[in-house]
Image: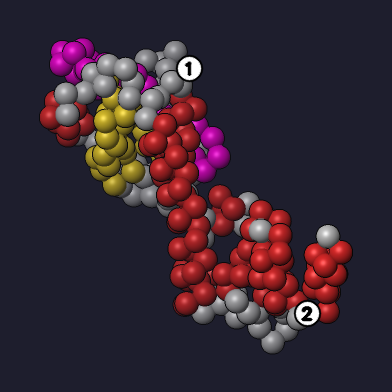
């Protein structure tokens, strides 16, 4: 115990750029702040600030919100002095791995029990995108996930979805139900008239095919709107 205390107190004498790495070795990754973890990714700062200080400034630009930071592009990161292409790629890659880990956790769970389960999956997948995408989750009779499929990609304000393309994989996979989801990059969770009309068309087609449309979610980076929860489906 005394040796460990001596090691930790000795950190104060090290160069600040080295402290996050040494702190991780001594205490583990969970002991580090977001800025310290980013500092490890970028490795060094610039002539006027350490890697930790630079990381704090990057976080400040995203209001200290990692979800917001996940929306930052490579070119935006390179606007910070000391962040070149390689460092920007490292940060974006790390954030993408974190997003994929969350998605993998939901897929491993396999069973969808509520709209929040759907948001856990698609919020991480779509919430940070600058454009709209439309996805479908295919379920069996026990609400276990068979697959997830991107049906269309659009612009900043809308994406066109063909009802036939939604149900084609459902028939091929012998799905009993589907949940559809798309994102609103604007952050506005209110469904548009097009969203409402499409949901009605999907529900009607599902009745004919005996494939239930459980829900339609609109997601943003931090919240969602469920048609089912709001009595619209």
Query: Residue 217: within the magenta?
Result: yes
Q: Is residue 70 left or right of residue 175?
A: right
Kindly indicate whether the residue at mark 1 contacts the one at mark 2 (C-beta within 8 angstroms). Answer: no
Could you say which quadrant of the image residue 161 lies in? top left
Q: Give the spatial CA distance, label 2 vs label 1.
A: 56 Å
Report the span colored magenta: 198-225
Secondary structure at numbered mark 1: loop
Any mark on residue 14, and which? 2
- The mark lying in front, picked from 2 and 1, is 2
Q: Nearer the viewer, residue 127 or 107?
A: 107
Could you say which quadrant of the image residue 49 lies in? bottom right
Quadrant where the C terminus sits is: top left
Please report the residue visible at 66 percent of the width from the left and 58 percent of the height from the top: 28
Q: Is residue 223 left or right of residue 144?
A: right
In this rendering, the answer to whether 189 lies above or below 12 is: above
Residue 172 position, x and y percent, is 13, 29
How is this picture coloured?
A: secondary structure
Q: Which residue is mark 1?
A: 230
Could you say which quadrant of the image residue 41 lies in? bottom right
């Amino acid at each position: 115990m005394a040796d460990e205390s001596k090691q930790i107190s000795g950190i104060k004498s090290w160069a600040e750029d080295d402290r996050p790495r040494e702190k991780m070795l001594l205490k583990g990754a969970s002991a580090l702040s977001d800025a310290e973890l980013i500092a490890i990714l970028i490795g060094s700062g610039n002539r006027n600030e350490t890697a930790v200080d630079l990381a704090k400034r990057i976080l400040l630009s995203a209001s200290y919100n990692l979800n917001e930071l996940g929306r930052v592009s490579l070119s935006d990161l390179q606007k910070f002095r000391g962040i070149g292409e390689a460092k920007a790629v490292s940060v974006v890659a790390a954030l993408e791995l974190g997003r994929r880990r969350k998605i993998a956790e939901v897929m491993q769970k396999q069973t969808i029990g509520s709209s929040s389960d759907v948001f856990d999956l698609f919020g991480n997948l779509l919430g940070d995108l600058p454009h709209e995408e439309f996805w479908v989750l295919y379920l069996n009779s026990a609400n276990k996930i068979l697959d997830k499929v991107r049906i269309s990609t659009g612009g900043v304000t809308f994406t066109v979805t063909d009802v036939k393309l939604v149900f084609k994989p459902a028939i091929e996979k012998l799905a009993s139900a589907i949940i559809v989801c798309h994102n609103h990059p604007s952050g506005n969770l209110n469904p548009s008239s097009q969203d409402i009309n499409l949901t009605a068309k999907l529900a009607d087609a599902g009745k004919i095919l005996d494939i239930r449309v459980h829900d339609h979610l609109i997601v943003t980076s931090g919240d969602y709107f469920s048609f089912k929860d709001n009595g619209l489906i």
